[in-house]
Image: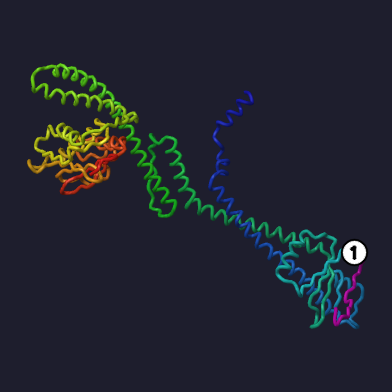
Amino acid sequence: MSDETRTALARDLPAPALSRWFESLSFRLFALTIASILLVEGLIFVPSASGFRNAWLQERVQAARTAALALDAAPSRSVSNDLSDELLMSAEVLAVTEIEDDMRVQLLPAQQAINGQMHEIDLRESTMVSRSFAAMGSFFAPDDRILVIHGEGSAPGRVMEIVVPQAPLKTAMLAFARRIAALSLLIAFVAATIIYVMLHFLVVRPMRRVTLSAEQFRDDPGAWTRRLPPTSRRDEIGRAQNALADMEDTVATSFRNRAHLAELGTAVAKINHDLRNSLASAQLVSDVLARSEDPRVQKAAPRLERALERAISLATQTLDYGKATPQAARMEPVSLQSALDESAAEALATHPGVDWDNRVPANVQVNADPDHLHRITSNLIRNAAEAMASQAEGGSRIIATLTPQGLDLADTGPGLPNSARENLFKPFAGSSRSSGTGLGLVIARELAQGMGGNLVLASTGPDGTVFRLSLPGLGA
């Protein structure tokens, strides 16, 4: 097997579980907790090291005081060289001197030559800040440095001066630092583990469920079946989970509707194909009827011909609507009163009990597409007539009025239900009739907007419904 093949296979293999854990939120929380605790321990270490150093120095001063008290009991405050060497060793110092009234008394002289750089430390005037800086400097000080320490003497007014090597202090502080580091790591690990376990159950696991659900939904939203259940949590994670669950339900429903619409679109395309063929045959028959000499046929033939042309145009434009390629409007001057009367005659042909009241002046013209205007107004008039179909004869009326805002088409029906108002201009959702598709008003508004206007619901209630058509230049 070639190296290239091995490399390709390695890329295709899933990442190990340990590698995935290092990239997870759990590891980041664990590492962040340890780092935070170590940072706090580091900040605490400085004053701790300062206190340890000061205590170490004070112990040497106290041991020198004890040796000075032993000398006070000796004759002439002097001892043999052997005893002096033993006292220096017990105090862990090189030499002890006491100063009183600017007079230096060598209590325990050095038993050997002292070589090295002298560094003076006055414990009587030190501050917390100076001790902290001095403690950090002790870790990097040279081992051959000699410390000359000044502290309180064995009696008031006396100053104790002791000489000690730097190396024992540095060794003790390094040992202290190692103990503190080990203890800090132990505390950090234990605390991080406790915090990690708590966060794992409270944060990581819920977020993992949300993340996996979102990834599954992203990969295959149409066929995804494992729904994320809602939760009773009211924090940010609970709100995110509930929002994702709602989104999944909404999108899944949209995918189902999309599938239904795709199937419906295929069926409509087939129906339109057959309908256009049938209408073409009917148009041939209308052409034959148009040549008839019967006055009644000659009167009805033009209307039949226009109806067939509009039906063919409607079938074509319905296919274009499904392809998201709306037909461009062909604007021309149109007599509004005549256009409304023609639409009413076609829409109310099957509703003889509905009165048509056209109050638009005869001289009003509007710049519009005649076919688009006819489709809009005939749809509105037909909808109004069907809404009033259950009313008694004589009580149903449709009124066309020109207002400053546009053309109002009002009926005397019972008004639209709340469910229809909310989805009035949504495809397949806005119809108030059980047999309606909800496409009529959607297409009507789209046609109005294509002519530079709009179609809105002006009002609805127990006294009737008013739709308002606005077009450029249309108004009282």
- Which of 179/8 is in front? 8
Tell me the residue at 65%/63% (across/down): 44
Q: Is residue 107 magenta?
A: yes
- Which stretch appears magenta? 99-116
- Which of 258/425 is in front? 425
Residue 468 image position (x, y, % from top left) = 24, 43
Task: Choose top left, top right, bottom left or bottom right for residue 42.
Answer: bottom right
Tell me the residue at 56%/43% (across/down): 23
Q: Amino acid at mark 1?
A: Asn
Q: Is residue 168 left or right of residue 440?
A: right
- Which of 312/89 is in front? 312
Q: Is residue 437 magenta?
A: no
Tell me the residue at 90%/64% (across/down): 115
Query: Is residue 295 visible to us here?
Result: yes
Residue pointed to by mark 1 = 115
Q: Is residue 438 left or right of residue 182?
A: left
Q: How many marks?
A: 1
- What is the quadrant of the C terminus in the image? top left
Task: Choose top left, top right, bottom left or bottom right for residue 367.
Answer: top left
Query: Is residue 425 visible to us here?
Result: no
Residue 160 image position (x, y, % from top left) = 82, 76
* Mark 1 surroundings within 10 Å by alpha-carbon count, few (fewer than 14), some (14 through 19), many (20 or more): few
Tell me which colouring the rendered structure shows.
rainbow
Tell me: residue 348, above or below residue 122: above
Tell me: residue 376, above or below residue 187: above
Task: Choose top left, top right, bottom left or bottom right for residue 250.
Answer: top left
Residue 63 image position (x, y, % from top left) = 80, 73
Tell me: residue 391, above or below residue 82: above
